[in-house]
Image: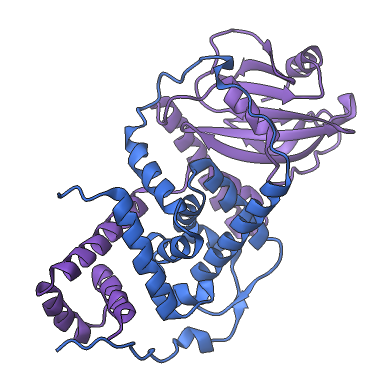
Chain colours: A purple, B blue
Amino acid sequence: MSMRALERDLTRLADGSLPAELREPLEQLVARSPELQRRLSEQRRAVAAARYVAERERAPLAIRMSRRVLEPPPRSRRRGLMFALAGSLAALASILTLAGGGAPGLTVARAATLATRPALATVGEPAEDSVTLPRLRAAGLTFPYWEDRYGWRATGMRTDSIAGRTLTTVFYRRGAQQIAYTIVSGRPLTSAGGASAITAGDRHIVTWPRGGHTCVLSSQDVSGSEMLDLATWRVAS
Amino acid sequence: MYVVADHALPAPAASSQAPARRLDPNHLGDHLDRLYRAAWALCGSREDAEDLVQDTYARILQKPRMLRSGEDLGYLLRVLRNTHFSRLRAAARRPRPDPLPDELDHIEDRSALGPEKALASSELYATIAALPDPFREALVAIDVVGLSYREAARALRVREATITTRLYRARRRLAEALGDESR
């Protein structure tokens, strides 16, 4: 007698995939054995738990939005639909934020840690004389184009979701130096009306409210005062 | 009378005979929720799961993929799993940056809801993530993603009987970790 084969049948009986002709005989066998009843109960508990969370959890909005960035450009006949979808998602994000969705614990420091993580998508080249990066908005705000004026080239971006907020980060590089510019959607993280500079270890952080949201600049290579200059460079939003 | 025996494998599914076709990037979003859950169960962390899903999509979209009909989800799960292990290997080679102290400031999002609802899911995913790799992969493929045993076996490139045995053990460990609340 193969105990493994019996275990495999119990596995399938627990999730309902055992062939019908085997189900009833196995159920009769289980009914006569407390040990098999215990094993089947274990299997069913695990199935129920896994299915319960699987039915509840959906991919965060941040992934849904960033996934579109990674996709190839939509065909022209779909463009209107995609823009409408993007608008709906932005509106939904706005509603979720206003409704206060998410968990506590998001701080400027935590937002600044995104500077240590890798970019996950590329950033398009702006048109001539542009002051913002093309087709890239977070919470309705644009990211600045600094290359011509300051020599900072946008090299990539990523989108994260922390504590129910969407955080969009663009990475800028000038030689070996790097700055991460993060826009945190939702209510401002600080109550300060203007920009503030913080130093944490070897990292400089500048944060300021913009358009009802929070912007965070973070770098190990650039001083707080230089980042304050960058922060106060006005961007059309 | 119940007789314990290895069941004969059913005839190969029609999909395995079907001609290959190109994976349509516009339909990748159909599987996003299930891939995200699988990623969370593999990583044990919501944030890492987000990165893993994005990395997986980026890898898939790098070039056209030719698949047979009905294999999309199994294929995506296989890429997700491979990407997960690639990230683990890369992370092991890379020096980890020192995290910033969270007590740098204490500005809380007061509008946020309590985390109780997310806690149960987080604990369960963390428990699944702590299972040994073969057990975890079987449980993720079948109970979390919802693949059939045949699809899961094909996606993970193991025999159907093997994945069933692994699933049995995975569920058993998961049930032990969860405890028996009925007692």
Q: Is residue A20 left or right of residue B44?
A: left
Q: Is residue B3 left or right of residue B85?
A: left
x then y, percent, for residue B51: 59, 46
Q: Quadrant of the C terminus of chain A?
A: top right
- Whether residue B159 can be seen here: yes
Q: Quadrant of residue B6?
A: bottom left
x then y, percent, for residue A87: 52, 40
Q: Residue at x 55, y 44 (%)?
A: B48
Q: Residue at x 32, y 81 (%)?
A: A5
In this rendered view, identify the residue nearer to me: A68 or A49.
A49
Q: Residue furthest top?
A: A193
x then y, percent, for residue A192: 58, 8
In this rendered view, identify the residue nearer to me: A56 or A96.
A56
Q: Quadrant of the N terminus of chain A?
A: bottom left
x then y, percent, for residue A145: 79, 30
Q: Residue at x 32, y 33 (%)?
A: B116
Residue A231, relative to residue B8: is it above or below?
Answer: above
- All told, the count of numbered labels is 0
Residue A123, relative to residue B99: is it above or below?
Answer: below
- Whether residue A17 can be seen here: no
Q: Quadrant of residue B173?
A: bottom left
